[in-house]
Structures are given as C-alpha cells and as structure tokens.
Amino acid sequence: MSRFADIYTTLFKISVAIMLQYRAVLVIWLIGLVLQPIIYLVVWLTVAEARGGQVGDFDKAGLAAYYIVLMIVNHATFDWHMYEMGYRVRTGAFSPLLLQPLHPIHRDIIENVAYKFITLSVMLPAILLLTWLFEPSFGAPIWAVAAFVPALLMAFLVRFFVEWSLALSAFWITDTSGLNQMYVIAALFLTGQMAPLSLMPQWVQSVAGVLPFRWMVAFPVELLLGRLSPEQVFDGFLMQALWLGAGLAVLALTWSRAARRYSAVGA
Amino acid sequence: MRILRLFFVFFRIGLMNELQYRANFFVQLLKTAFNITWSLAAVTVVFSHTSDLNGWQPAELVALLGVFVLMSGLIGVVIQPSMERLIEDVREGTLDFALTKPEEAQILVSIGQVRVWRLVDVVVGPIVIGAALYYMGRGIGLEIALQFGVTLLAGSVIMYSFWLMLSTIAFWFIRIENILIVFHSMFEAARWPITIYPGWLRTALTFLVPVAFAVTVPSEAIVGRLSEGFLYGAVALAAVMLVGSRWFWRLGVKQYSGASA
Amino acid sequence: MSDTSAIRLDDLSKTYRVPVREPGLAAALKSIVRRQHREVEAVKQISYEVAAGEIVGFLGPNGAGKTTALKMLSGLLNPTAGEVRVLGHEPFRRDRDFLRQITLVMGNRNQLVWDIPVSDSFERNRAIYRLPQEEFRRTVDGLAELLDLGDLLDKPVRNLSLGERMKCEIAAALLHRPKILFLDEPTIGLDVTMQRRLRRFIKEYNKRYEATVLLTSHYMADVEALCHRVVVIHHGQLLFDGNLSSLVERFSPHKTVALDLEQEGMDLSAYGEVVSTDGSRVTLLVRKEEAARITGQLLADLPVIDLTVEEPSIEEVIEQVFAQEVE
C-alpha cells in the first residue's frame, strides 16, 4: 500500500510539472469550460423569460446556480482518455505503457487528478465570473454540503471507470469517434448538461436514473443545490456504489482481453 | 476556373485516400445522424416548455439547425482540414513544398486537404432546411432565395477568412492548434440564434469570432426575417475580411521566408 | 529449457492479415463494399536460443521481421504459433516479474518526457518499477558515470541533442537493471563518435551486470564491435545462426585480391572478376578455393610490385546475403 502511495505521489508531482509547461493552454480551455454551460443557461433563461421568469421548478437565479454547480461537477468528473485511447492503439503509443510493471489506468487517474489540481486556478475565476454575470442564488442545508464531497468523489470514480471501460472498445474498433460521439450525446441529455433532468420528459428521467449517467453528474449537482431529500441522497449513494462496482467488474473482465487483442493486431 | 480545377484534383485525391477507410463513411453518416437527432431532441425539450424562443418558432429553429449543419460541413470538408494542415506545415517546415510550386500558395494551402466524407453534412443540411420550410408551409420567393444565397456565400467567405487569419498566426507562434479549440466551442454557440445571448457574448460571436454571420444571418434570411442592414453588413464584412486575410497571409509568408532563409 | 538459455524461440511464427488494395478510383470504390485480405507471414518458424550473458546481433533487411520478433520477445505481440520463453516466462502474459527484468529500447521512439528534466523522467521510472531509493541512486550514479551524463540530467529533454537524448533514453531504460536488453536500432541517426560511445557502454553493461543483449542494427560496425554471434533473418525466415566469421565464410565464396603492377592498363579478366582498375592498381574478385592457385599464377605471370588477399567486409557479405532470395 505504501508502495502505491509512492507511485501516486511521484507520478502526481511529475504530471503537474509537465502540465505546468502548458499554462497558456489552460486559459484557452477556460473558454470552452465556461462557454458550454453558458449556452444552455442562456437558452433556459430565455425560456424562463418567455414564461414570466420561471421554468419548471427553476427561477432565473436557480437556473444560474444550477449551471454554475454543473460546470464545477462536470469539470471535476470529466476525463479525456477516452478520446486518446484510439490514438494510443493506432499509433502504438500504448506499447511503452504495456511494458511497464504498472497498470496503465493508474497513470491515467493520476494525470486526471493532476489536471484537475492545476485547473483549479482557472476554475475559481470562472465561478466568480459566472456568479457576477448571472446572479445565482444558492441555498443548501449543511448536511447536503457535507454529503456533496463524497458524492462528487463517487461521481468521479463512476464516470472514470465507466468511460475507461468504454474506451477499451478502441482495441476492437479502429475508429471510435462515432461511438464516443454517441456516448457524449447520451451524456449531454442524461447527465443533466443540456437541461436539468427535472425539465426533461419523464421517460428520459427514468432512463437517466437506471443508467450510470445521472449518478456521474446530476446527482451531486442537485445535492449541492439542496434539491434532494435525505432518502433520495441515500438512494443516490447506493446507485453510485452499484455502478462503480459494475464499472470495475467490466474493466476486470475486459482488460486482459483488450491487451491480448492489442498484441494480436500488431503493437 | 483554375481554382475549381485544382479543387477537383485535390478532391479526387482526398476521395481515393479516404476510400481506403471505408468505415469512415459510415462513421460520418452515423455522426451526422447523431448530430441532427440530438439537436432536434434539444429543440424538442426546449419547446416542450415554451412555444417561442426569443421570437423563433420551432420549425424556424430547425431551419437554423439545417444551416448550422450545412455550414459546419462546408468548414469541415475543406477549410478546417486545409488550415490544420497549414499549421502543421509551418511547424514542420514542409510549407516549403507549397511555396515552391508554380501556383499561388494561398490557393494551394486553402484547398490542399479535403475531408470528403464531411460532404454528408453539406448534403444533409439543405435537406433539413427544406424539411423545415415544408413544415412551415412556406415556399420561398426569389428574393428570399437570393438573400439566403448571398448571406450563405458571405458567411462561408467570412469563415474561410477567419480560419486563414487564425492559422496564419502560426507563422509567428508555432503552438497554435489549441486556438482551434476555442473556435469549436464558440461555433457550438451558433446552434442557437445569436440573439438570445447577453450583449457581451453576442458582440463576441458577431465580431470577435464571427459565427453569427455564418449561421444566424443566413437562417434569418431563409425564414424571411433578415434586416437589410445585416444583408449589406454581411457582404461588406466578407469583402473586408477576404482582403484583410489576404494581406495578413502575405505578411505571414514574408515572416516565414525571412525566418527560414 | 536449459538453465543457461535466457531466451528461447521454438518455431515462432507471426501472421498478419492486411487489406489488399488496387490503385485507381474504381478499385477504391469497390473496396468500400468488399475488402480483400491477404495473409502476411512476418515471421516464419524461427528457432534459436540465446544464453544468459550473450550479446547476439539480430540482422535482416527492412521488413525482414526483426521488429516483429523483438515485439514478440518483449511481450507486445502475441505469436500466431510456436513458443517463446524469456527467462522462463511467456512474454505475452506480461507478468510484472517478467517486465521488471527486461527492457526494450527503440532508437526511433522515446519514452522520456519532452518538457521536463531528465531526472524527473528517471524519478517516474523509479516509482513505476518500485526501486528502493538507495539502489536507485547507485544505479543512476553508475549509469551517469558510464554514459558521461554529467549535467544532462537537470536539463529538459527538448534542450538535448539527439545523441545526448539517446544516452538519457538508454539510461532511463536501464534504471531497473534489466537482465535482458532488447535493443532495436539503438544507434540510429547518431554520429560516429556517439555510436562508438554507446557500443562501448553496451559492452560494459553486459559485462558488469551479466545482461543478455539482443540487438538489431543497420550499422555493421555495431555488430562487429559487440556480437560474436549473429542471427540473420530474411523474409521472416531464419537464414543463418552462428559466428560472425563463419557468416563470412559461408556467404561469401570470394576473396579480394589487390595488385600493384609495374605496368598500367593490363587486362586481368582471365584471372578473375575485375572490380576496379586505377592506373597500375587492380582489384580482382576470385573464388575462395582458387585464391591460392590464382595468386601464385599472378605472381608468376606478371610484374607484381605488391599483392594482398583480403576477406570481403561484413558489410559486403550482409549485402550479398540479403540480395539472394530464400528458397
């Protein structure tokens, strides 16, 4: 265990050092990070405007709060390795990773955490900027704020393992961009990015609740906004645990096959 | 004419190249289908709560979606791949090949790379527009068609000039690829009428990264709501940007030859 | 498996399936609908053994299957048929225990991180290979001394020259003191001094740690300096396995006879194949078994000032080997 601690701290420091070389890029990423939630926030504000300032169970300040928290949670839980996997397989960039006595997933987790650590520096100004521009109103009981932390951590893990397992399809399919796009679109609707789930048709809400999507993003968002009852939060943690288990199980089953497949097609 | 002939040659090469990867065709078809489906779904969700989005009716928004798909197809077929190639060529020093050919280098780099399958978007976009018009039960008169044609052409020219200027920055700053990401996130905003955005963002989307002229303005034309000001404005901006980008390109080439000599 | 063999290949084969494509637009369109495949046997039933501590040169022209074989040996590729054993492990299982004992260096690929100092990349490998601090320090010091790394370790990789980078690359690959080294063109693109330096290092490492080395290279100087034994493959098949000297004997039936004559412009084609004539200096190619007889004859018949008989260079022999088709 302490050996793993050494691997994680060492690689974390190095990942941070590498990423700090690309500081300018962080600013550029900031634009994308802020713009996407703004687009949908504005769309829904326009709708609310047309309906006298209220849409569903959201008023304008509520919508602003929703999208700001969504931006935080979405950023905290997202991972990009899914898009890199196809490239790694095609170019053979996976080879050196396979020849090291360490499962490649560890490096990806560390890289992700390092990236999040560094981007905190752009996240904070982004939050302030949006708060100033859209005047949100927050209000959540203390217990919800406390429960948000483990919920966010679980959401990150669920999303990471589900997406990493999905990314392994790159070992069988040459071009995964279609599959990735399909996933991104599904996530857009089902994680609450396009609209708060409560504004979606009932059947979409049900689908989002059965699949892992809701538990990857929407759940912690709604929790921090104080929109969930303690029972709902309990169920949420249960679903997160369930999907984390499922993700890990799929990964355990497919990883060795994927690696073998890689060796069959020609590293 | 010469440009068209050259374009056809490059197109043929691009086609042959891409035919090797047959899956790409189906992947592109799939992507376009997803793209349209989810946009329609988003429109549906929004209009399940309202009947009018800042003056736009559902069918009008679908028409805008068609223009968006068409324009992203036009950018995707030739502008973006050629410009990405240009940036890479500048970095690798392989731009020398284009500069030493007996043909205007700007033309060569502007159509040098063709991503054939993106034509799917160019075909599907107008179909969506047609469907939306049919649904609205509105035929289009000559005037509207003309306005649409002019604004679409102006929009394409503006997009081309914008991309050329953006890529030309590579002559001074090598690591420019990431700026392209900014364009993509800004372009996403054009899925919705620019008029819904707050003033500062609307200004940015009109003048800083002029996606408003690429999608919203032609869409306003096709639904018959274009103000004269925007019509002339689009044409004027297109002309200015075309000339400006040409000037900027030449400046860049001068810088390049100066540096590498 | 005998205790002394570190690497063993038994009828090792690898077959790829590749799409076939004809030129032209019509053919391209057709291939969209139906695609034809062809099987390519990259490696065909190769068998050999390498003893622990040996340095073996693995030779073959481009596309002969060297890299494919190296990848099977290091565990990146699955063999289609046959068996591989490296230190008693089946490489493609990639057991941690196996991975900790090998290293693969590819001259045209780098694993050092471009933007950070070399020592940080080393540090990363220390963590991944779980090397004890103490031992790691000693290894780094040892490698730094052997390769003369000096202050290179504190520089970001992007500021290093190709030769400097390659030295660091190799050091990074050896931090865990692997027992088996797979070196794929380690000297490619380096200048002659640097090549010589690396060669000396590989030899030294081999001696110091009794490491087994399997090396591919296009530079015969590498092979001559390092390997007593060479394994030659061509078109995926094993062509030769043995001493460098017997390779020359077996594949070159000729010797080179160089003469300095008193007279210019003499025609010597009756004695053997004239390779070059430069004024009074003539070079002849003669069959090996006739070399003695012909030199005697030349000395008897002609006004010879000086005469030398030489074996052809390894380079020439290899060229000859690769030129011939495999039956």
Image (cartoon, helix red, strand yellow):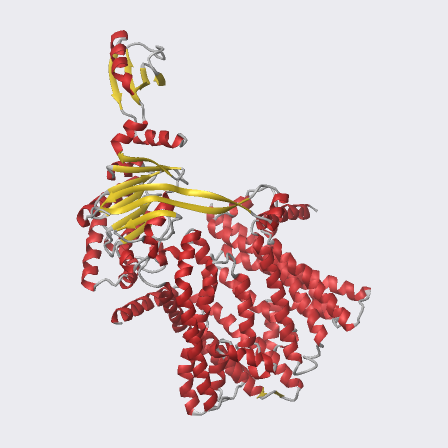
Task: State the residue lying farthest toward the top.
Answer: C301
- Residue pictured at 52% horizontal, 65% vertical: A180
Number of marks in the image?
A: 0
Name the quadrant containing residue B62: bottom right
Residue C198: horizontal and vertical position, in percent?
26, 44
Residue C254: horizontal and vertical position, in percent?
31, 22
Residue A23: horizontal and vertical position, in percent?
42, 67
- Residue pictured at 63% horizontal, 85% vertical: A48
Task: State the residue lying farthest toward the bottom.
Answer: A141
Query: Quick one: A198 or B196, which is closer to the camera?
Result: A198
Quadrant of the image containing the C terminus of chain C: top left
- Residue pictured at 31% horizontal, 69% vertical: A8
Residue A177: horizontal and vertical position, in percent?
53, 61
Is residue B182 visible to the viewer in this orientation of the structure? Answer: yes
In the picture provided, is A162 more to the left or to the right than B113? left
Query: Quick one: B63 or C50, which is closer to the camera?
Result: C50
In the picture provided, is C7 more to the left or to the right than B137? left
Is residue C106 visible to the viewer in this orientation of the structure? Answer: no
Query: Quick one: B177 or A67, which is closer to the camera?
Result: A67
Check the image and report above or below for B255 versus A54.
above
Name the quadrant containing residue B144: bottom right
In the picture provided, is C73 more to the left or to the right than A58? left
